[in-house]
Image (tube, helix red, strand yellow):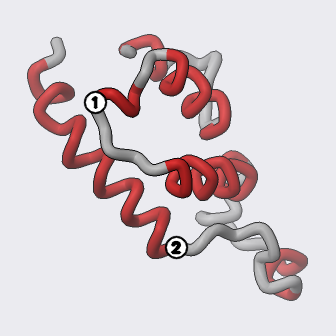
Amino acid sequence: MLNLSENIYGHDLNKILQKADENKIKAYIALTDDHCVYIRLASNYYSGKVFEYPTVFEAMQCYPDMPPIDELFSAATILVESLRQSCLEAK
């Protein structure tokens, strides 16, 4: 899983999630199918830096493809809590 940080993935959450699925991440982390859908929806916003630099067009459209933020926070919390110890131990 260390290779997920390499440039071939960049900030593309779709690619990262696909590789994580291939490595059976759900056997270790309690992400739901909905969490995965929301992460995929967030990928365009994340890779385009829209979370950091919102565009006027997206704001005027009320961010039509934005997943529910509370669900993204839920997925992030699960990932951080589940992976924290493994990351601290990895060297």
Where on the picture, by quarter, is residue 26? top left
- Disc 2 or disc 1, which is closer to the eye? 1
Amino acid type, residue under disc 1 in the picture:
Tyr
Give the percent coordinates (x, y) of residue 50.
70, 63
**Label 2 element class:** helix
Amino acid type, residue under disc 2 in the picture:
Ile
69 sits left or right of 66 in the view: left
Q: Which residue is mark 2?
A: 69
Q: Residue at x 81, y 75 (%)?
A: 64
Q: Residue at x 37, y 63 (%)?
A: 74
Give the percent coordinates (x, y) of residue 43.
67, 49
41 sits left or right of 74 in the view: right
Q: Which residue is mark 1?
A: 28
**Label 1 element class:** loop
How far, Cα to Cα, is label 2 from label 1? 23 Å
Q: Is residue 57 above or below residue 34?
A: below
Give the percent coordinates (x, y) of residue 37.
63, 52
